[in-house]
Image (spheres, rainbow, N blue to C red):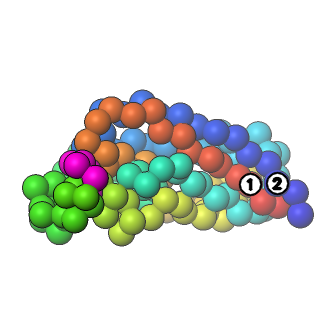
């Protein structure tokens, strides 16, 4: 088994900002020069997540609205009380969605659906530079 990979970086304003990382991941996967394999995408940090979705303004808005209802920023969270912090909702949202995705590589391309993109979601309540590790196993 061989492992290839690289890093992506994204500057975000936080607060649920969604970044389409599909092209960046595909570019790293292409440098591996393999036909078949598995691409793992992992975001570093406890207030950031990676998932797939149809990346379009309506879908992004609906996801943000859903998360605001399920895990509101203004909730009464023990994390905020204990740590004199304001980002407990960010940790919880990231934990629910998760930091990684694995996508098959078929014919040298990511096996994503027509309307399926890989996205990074930064839930923290401040701007950040996020790092995404991309590994191709072949």
Quadrant holding the C terminus: bottom right
Judging by the rendered image, the residue that carries numbered circle 1 is 136
Q: What stretch is highlighted in magenta?
A: 83-89
User: Does 123 sit left or right of 103 as displayed?
Assistant: left
31 in relation to 72, above or below: above
How many numbered discs? Answer: 2
Comparing 129 with 114, the one in front is 129
Instruction: Name the residue nearer the viewer: 121 or 75.
Output: 75
Element assignment for label 2:
strand
Q: Which residue is drawn at 57% across and 54% down?
A: 42
- Measured Cα–Cα span from mark 2 to mark 1: 6 Å
Residue 35 spot, x, y in % from top left: 80, 56
Q: In which quarter of the image is the N terminus?
A: bottom right
On the image, the x and y values in percent for residue 33 come to 82, 46
Q: Residue at x 82, y 54 (%)?
A: 3
| Residue that label 2 marks | 3
Res 18 visible? yes
Front residue of this view, candidates 136 and 98: 98
Disc on the earlier residue, 2 or 1? 2
Answer whether residue 114 is visible to the viewer in this image. no
Q: Quadrant of residue 88?
A: bottom left
Q: Position of residue 104 (x, y in %)?
A: 66, 65
Indicate the position of residue 79 as horizontal and vertical percent values.
Answer: 27, 60
- Residue 138 in magenta? no
For label 1, the crowd category at 10 Å Cα-Cα, with few meaning under 14, some 14 to 19 and many 20 or more, is many
2 and 1 marks in contact (CB < 8 Å): yes
């Amino acid at each position: 088994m061989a492992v290839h990979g690289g890093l992506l970086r994204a500057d975000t304003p936080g607060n649920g900002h969604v970044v389409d990382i599909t092209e960046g991941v595909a570019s790293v996967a292409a440098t591996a020069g393999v036909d078949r394999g598995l691409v793992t995408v992992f975001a570093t940090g406890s207030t950031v997540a990676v998932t797939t979705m149809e990346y379009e303004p309506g879908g992004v808005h609906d996801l943000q609205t859903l998360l605001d209802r399920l895990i509101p920023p203004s909730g009464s969270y023990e994390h905020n009380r204990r740590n004199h912090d304001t980002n407990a909702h960010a940790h919880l949202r990231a934990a629910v969605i998760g930091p990684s995705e694995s996508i098959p590589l078929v014919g040298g391309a990511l096996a994503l659906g027509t309307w399926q993109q890989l996205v990074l979601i930064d839930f923290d309540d401040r701007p950040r530079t996020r790092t995404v590790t991309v590994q191709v196993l072949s």
